[in-house]
């Protein structure tokens, strides 16, 4: 990954006139009425994007909205922490010990849960590999 939460990604802007590197070039090229798509995952900014790019981001936006709608009922559910995991956290046990206890109590990792969603047809292998890290047991 080029950027992330801890370090900024470079901005690469694409326009009908070509490619601009950096925010300064983008600011000089953009006008008030221009359409802009900012992709926070890749660090790309599309200034007056072509139709196929707009359509792809509209598709992604619709897909994302669908996922949010699916998750909406879960936001009010209480977190579940077993007594054993709670005690380990209280005792300042290592993250490895807490993880092992949680897994023994039935916790699945994000990636394991994602693979189940691939099998159910909810997501894709590419999406799982893009958004999850390999599990370290």
Image (cartoon, helix red, strand yellow):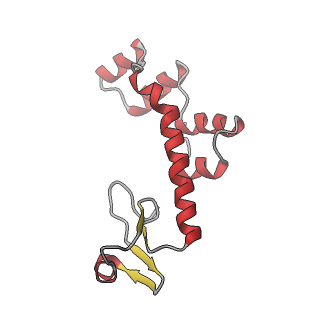
Residue reaching furthest to the bottom:
17
Residue at 57% over, 39% down: 111
Q: Nearer the viewer, residue 127 or 76?
A: 76
Identify which residue, 96 or 74, lies in the foreground.
74
Q: Where is residue 130 in the image (x, y as percent from the top left)?
A: 55, 53
Q: Residue 83 location, x and y as percent?
A: 39, 12
Vertical placement of residue 5 versus 86, above or below: below
Where is residue 125 shown, x and y percent of the image?
66, 48
Placement of 91 over or under 112, stated as above or below: above
Quadrant for residue 43, please give it: bottom left
Horizontal and vertical percent position of residue 103: 53, 25
In this view, which residue lies farthest toward the top?
83
> Can residue 101 be seen at all in this image of the molecule?
yes
Q: Residue 93 lies in what quarter of the image?
A: top left
Residue found 55% across the figure and 47% down from its top? 63
102 over 128 or under it: above or below: above
Determine whether, in the image, residue 118 is placed left or right of residue 133.
Answer: right
- Name the side, left or right, on which 14 lies relative to 10: right
Q: Between residues 15 and 1, which one lies in front from this camera angle? A: 15
The residue at 44%/32% (across/down) is: 96
């Amino acid at each position: 990954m080029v950027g992330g939460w801890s370090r900024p990604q470079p901005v690469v802007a694409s326009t009908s006139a070509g490619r601009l590197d950096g925010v300064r070039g983008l600011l000089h090229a953009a006008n008030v009425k221009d359409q802009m798509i900012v992709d926070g995952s890749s660090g790309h900014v599309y200034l007056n994007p072509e139709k196929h790019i707009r359509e792809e981001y509209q598709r992604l936006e619709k897909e994302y909205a669908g996922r949010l709608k699916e998750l909406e009922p879960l936001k009010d559910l209480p977190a579940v922490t077993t007594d054993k995991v709670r005690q380990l956290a209280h005792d300042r046990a290592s993250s490895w010990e807490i993880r092992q206890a949680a897994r023994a109590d039935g916790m699945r990792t994000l990636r394991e849960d994602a693979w189940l969603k691939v099998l159910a047809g909810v997501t894709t292998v590419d999406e799982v590999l893009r958004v999850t890290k390999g599990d370290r047991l």
